[in-house]
């Protein structure tokens, strides 16, 4: 009787091992697919925009602005393009739209006890600039 148990265990252990390994691989693959799908859902769709206008200094340090030919004012920031060398030039910039987070929007809102500043032209949107082409060295007014 013990001889039969030993013979069965020689075959049963490798079969169980192979079966459990394949089951573990299938579970790992489906978990990886779920993570990739979640990452794809979390990435916001970035719209590429191109704006032509006069490059000006912005309201905040490191920020620039441009008024497009359609009259919309865009806030510009860039880590790859040196915008400051083109101040006062007519340029065409391209990049992706960026939106402020809810926390940044709330920080910019009026706080209790503060005097409201005079209304100014608001920005249409912020643009993270990836390329710049100079159209002319001056701005047409």
Image (spheres, helix red, strand yellow):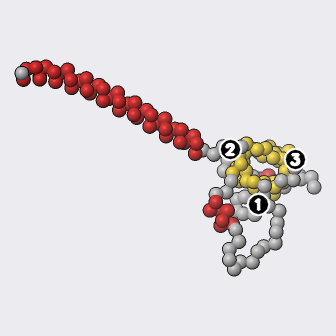
Determine whether 80 is above or below 29 in the image.
Answer: below
Q: Which residue is mark 3?
A: 136
The disc label shown at residue 92, or none: none
Q: Nearer the viewer, residue 26 or 80?
A: 26
Query: Does residue 76 appear anywhere in the picture?
Result: no
Q: Quadrant of residue 6?
A: top left
Residue at 93% over, 55% down? 141
Residue at 69% over, 66% down? 108
Alpha carbon separation for disc pair 2 and 3: 29 Å
13 displayed left or right of 63: left
Determine whether 27 is above or below 86 in the image.
Answer: above
Other residues around mark 2 within 10 Å, as few (<14) / some (14–19) / many (≥20)? few
Q: Quadrant of residue 45?
A: top right
Residue at 81% over, 72% down? 118
Query: Does residue 52 appear anywhere in the picture?
Result: yes
Q: Which residue is mark 2?
A: 46
* Residue 58 in the image, given as x and y percentages of width and height: 76, 60
First reached walking from the N terminus: tag 3 or tag 1: 1
Badge 1 element: loop
- Foreground mark, 3 or 1, reads 1
Q: Are marks 2 and 1 in contact (CB under 8 Å)?
A: no
| Residue sitting at the far front | 1
Badge 2 element: loop
48 displayed left or right of 53: left
Alpha carbon separation for disc pair 3 and 1: 20 Å
Q: Which residue is mark 1?
A: 58
Q: Nearer the viewer, residue 106 or 133?
A: 106
Q: Nearer the viewer, residue 121 or 6?
A: 6
127 displayed left or right of 139: left
């Amino acid at each position: 009787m013990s001889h039969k148990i030993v013979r069965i265990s020689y075959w049963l252990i490798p079969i169980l091992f192979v079966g459990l390994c394949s089951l573990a691989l299938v579970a790992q693959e489906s978990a990886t697919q779920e993570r990739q799908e979640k990452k794809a859902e979390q990435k916001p769709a970035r719209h590429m925009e191109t704006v032509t206008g006069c490059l000006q200094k912005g309201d905040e340090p490191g920020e620039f602005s441009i008024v497009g030919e359609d009259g919309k004012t865009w806030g510009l920031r860039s880590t790859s393009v040196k915008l400051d060398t083109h101040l006062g030039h007519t340029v065409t910039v391209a990049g992706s739209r960026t939106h402020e987070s809810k926390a940044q929007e709330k920080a910019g809102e009026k706080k209790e006890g503060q005097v409201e500043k005079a209304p100014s032209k608001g920005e249409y949107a912020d643009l993270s600039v990836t390329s710049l082409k100079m159209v002319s060295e001056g701005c047409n007014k």
